[in-house]
Image: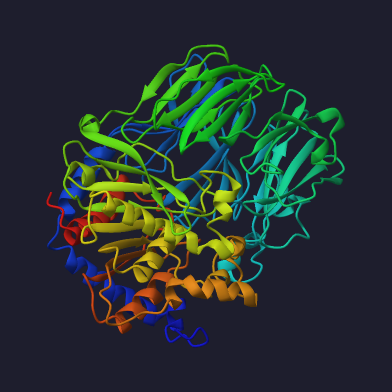
Amino acid sequence: MNSHTDQYSQLEDTESAASKKFYDKHNSKTDEYFTVSDLDYFAGRLLEISSTELRGLPGRYGKYTFWAERKPDWQKPKLLVQKKGNEPSVLLDLEESSESLDFWYPSAEGRKILYGTSENGNEQTTIHIIDVTTGSTLPDTIPFAGFTDQGGIVWENGSCFIYPRMNGFSKIGAKDKWLLGTKLYRHTIGSDPSADQLVYGGDLPDTIMLIPALSSDKRKLYVASCEDELTHKVSIIDLETLKLTPITNDMSASFAVKSGRGKVYALTNYKAPRYRLLMCYEDDVELCFDDWDEVLPESDDILQDYWIHKSGSIVAQYSHNVTSRLNIYDAYGNQTDVIHIPKYSVVHSVQCSPENQAIYYSLSSHTTPSTHYYLSDTFAQPVVVWQREKLASDDEIEVSQEWAISDDGTKIPYFYIRKIGIKSEAPCIVYGYGGFNIAVEPSYLTSMRPWVESGGSIAIASLRGGSEFGEQWHLGGSMASKQNTFDDCAAVGEDIISKGLSNSEKIGVMGGSNGGLLVSAVTVQRPDLFRAGAALVPLTDMLEFYKHQVAEFWVHEYGDPRIAEQRAWIEKWSPYHYPIKPDLHYPAVYYETALHDARVAPFHAFKMVARLEAIVTSWKGPLLLRTMTDTGHQSSNLTKLEIAHRTAEYYAFFAKELGLIV
């Protein structure tokens, strides 16, 4: 495709009459396709699976404990609170609302809690505040106060907090850029948000994310200014004078800063691709990271996160071959305990802070439901305090970790999941992401469960671009090396075939967002390997992506098309620009997008479908497009019934195209 001419550019205006006509036509076609399918079976089974109690890990703040919960008869999660000595009660209920709950941050003593909501899943978050002691919502309302992935919020005290505000608050620039331009502001409860004090970021580029952390004495703010996942600059801000002092290093690196018990820590890949933990005393912070003490040195495993306990001990989470380790160290890095984690399990959340003696953590595996554990102290034995109801088919499913070899010789792990006793070549879905330093780790099999129960198999791949094996693994699938991600995915498919687990007429590939880019790429690059693909909220036009929504943040992941050298490598693999050969037999593809998506603009799916249907003359199955008109990127506003029907389409599509009989 000639990158200088784009005959489908009119579809970039998703509100135009032409775009509406386009997606309405394809929604009708997609509806017709599913009239003869197993859609009802998958939707019904998914609804059964979701009709159980779900509960988030509790967090204790003073006398109050908070958590999110969804009971079997609730359509959406609700925010619950329990005061010490009292019964739990619902603090926030959005069951009948079109809003989604994006985040919540209790004050240190738990008497106030701020929370963010957005309409139709568009992630344009508005902050509200509840007085927990009375249950009343305060009049303070702050719009455009934090895109859900941008930074965080810290309470200075029970009446004042520091939060990120986007360009949209003052309506600066184009509408689809309002979620850029992060700056940190200070809000005092009861005051006018438009007069909030600018704390930091006034002269920074729009594409910088800011992650704040409060010092132990609450007099200073540590701020990581993030250009991308691996390029952070850390500064100290005096909260009385707003004087800024940078902490330096001599290379690009990431820093996750936390403080507690008079010390400040930084989890970093600075001179350590698999990460290490540095420490400095807060009463005399060294202004060069080379002068900080190394508490936990780099090891063979990946140091993923850490928490500071009231005793001064450190709880550290490591990853070994895409499964978790959880260790406890004293303040000087001497290991004092190991928390047992079952095979192929991952710790998904930890609640541990310098203010509390108690520790909570949650883990799961593909066949072990989410389980919450409680430790009364760092030396105590874990006690199970809650577990999601087990599914009857847990004992019927087997999981193995396999390894494929990519084109350049790199070993690529994947979890292969199937029903026990199925030894023949089974219809198989390869699931992958491979980007943004995000690991694809084991979690309880729910949405994929009906597929496996019916005799299909799943291959969950850890592709380069993720964080599974540290900084080098991420860099190996980004920028000029992005093609490796697609090669890794193809290698997994080829390995499945070589081991006799499936064949090219029964292999599909699925992924969302960056994973949707993956599916879009491999289905045009390797039409011989895959029979079908489901590209969910995908990127496709990688020469135009940075111009829309929040995507300018991503030029450090994919490359910047405005730079000639980088544009050249992007154009080689950009799905929308990849050479299409009309006479090849292309896989059936289901594209899904959402009109309120604030991350990936819907036109990516529109233009890709338009181009494919205009050029390709030979298909293995249909080319489908589903446009969701009532939600955004994460579908966080949908009910469990709506989510079940949406998800069922993926598996009904694969069942029909890969030959699975349910």
Please say whether residue 491 is visible from this viewpoint.
yes
In front: 193, or 245?
Answer: 245
- Return the x and y of residue 588 as percentages of the image width and height: 25, 68
Residue in front for this viewpoint, 348 or 504: 504
Residue drawn at x 25%, y 74% is 585
Q: Nearer the viewer, residue 148 or 491?
A: 491
Residue 437: % across, % down: 55, 50
The chosen color scheme is rainbow
Q: Is residue 298 left or right of residue 652?
A: right
Q: In this view of the protein, which residue sits in the foreground, 214 or 91?
A: 214
Left or right side of 355 for 658 = left
In this rendering, the answer to whether 549 lies above or below 305 is below
Q: Position of residue 256 (x, y in %)?
A: 66, 40
Looking at the rendered image, the quarter that the N terminus falls into is bottom left
Residue located at (44% from left, 55% from top): 121
What residue is at 38 percent from the left and 50 percent from the top?
A: 404
Looking at the image, residue 366 lies above or below residue 457: above
Please say whether residue 162 is visible from this viewpoint. no
Q: Position of residue 467 (x, y in %)?
A: 53, 46
Is 15 placed left or right of 400 in the picture?
A: right
Give the quadrant of residue 565: bottom right
